Image (spheres, helix red, strand yellow):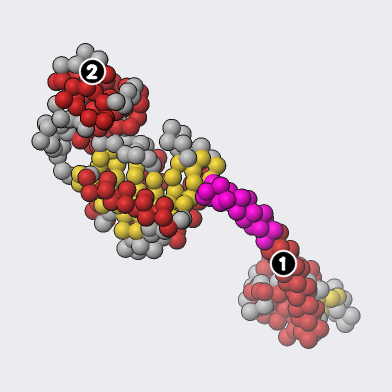
Amino acid sequence: MLDTLGLDTGSEQVYRGLLAMPGAGVAALAAYLGLTAAEVRAGLDVLSELSLVRPSAEHEGGLRAVSPDIGLDILMSRQQARLAAQQQRLEESRVAAAQLIAEYADQRSVAASLGGEQLVGLDEIRDRLAHLTREVREEVMAFSPDGAQTEASMAASRPLDRELLGRRVRLRTVYLDSVRNSPSTTAYAEWLTRLGGRIRTAPALPTRMIIIDRATAVMPVNGDDTAARAVVLTGQGILAALCALFETVWADARPLGASPARDDRGLTGQEEATVRLLAEGRTDESIAKRLGVSQRTARRIATGLMERLGARSRFEAGVLAVQAGWLPARAAH
């Protein structure tokens, strides 16, 4: 009961024994308390450090317990002094933390004046996303334009996905069609679907984006380097537009289990996206990045489309795609 004062159970037992048998030696205390001589000596060492015993004036070589009203009062005074010192350290830490938070908030307010909360570097982006996802209440909507996911990324996402779905948060994610060629990414998406998440795929995505509760969006500043810098947007107007963009892409995207379909022009969604990118003059590297496929695959798709159109160049492919009704007239210019 006195452990908060630094007196463990064994030492307290020895202390009570000395109070009952003033001047008793180690052997007598051990016999009285049912302890070993080593246990009694260990208890006496603790009592000595706490100034709860003193040499007996009546029994040479023996020890006498200090009266509890004196000894325990000293211990309580010491403990109170320790608590006061600890409280002072906590208060100093609180003040330092408040100053740090204020400095950080000042930096954020400057960034906000530039059009949104600026996040610089992958660590800062991940920290902010972790904070936002802990606070989500209803829904998370996301574009994931990276193609096949890494094993490390999927393993890191599973605990949070499980926790959010356990709180009945709605999760909707649009991946690129190319993830269908990745068994591990498909397995992860199927696992997420079984827990209640909803997954669809699209031939191409406009940007990486995460929308939290339709009130906060996180997007990269540069689509070519999404880890370098991101912006957190909270304005009602921009959020309304981003939510509308997500819903439009979601409506056109295919559920993960659905097989690729061709439209009335005979094009798959991936082929249609490639035609548009070709008409814009994109390179194989750029097309591959937008579709989340290898440059070899992007080149194969583009070559197949040019052969179907009978085009000898990408510029000619754009013109013939308009003539074939694959693209609106303005897309070839």
Q: Out of 96 and 285, give the one closest to the viewer.
A: 285
**Label at residue 91:** 1
Q: Image quarter for residue 291? A: top left
**Label at residue 316:** 2
Main SS type for the magenta part? helix
Say which of marks 1 and 2 sits in front.
Answer: 2
x and y percent of residue 137 in the render?
A: 39, 63
Residue 35 covered by magenta stretch: no
Residue ID at (75%, 78%): 76
x and y percent of residue 7 in the render?
A: 69, 73
- The Cα–Cα distance between marks 1 and 2, rounded to whole angstroms, is 73 Å
> What stretch of residues is rendered in magenta?
97-118
Outermost residue toward the right in this view: 57
**Label at residue 242:** none
Residue type, numbered disc 1:
Glu
In this rendering, is residue 230 above or below 243?
above
Sequence-wise, which precedes: disc 1 or disc 2?
1
Residue ID at (56%, 47%): 114
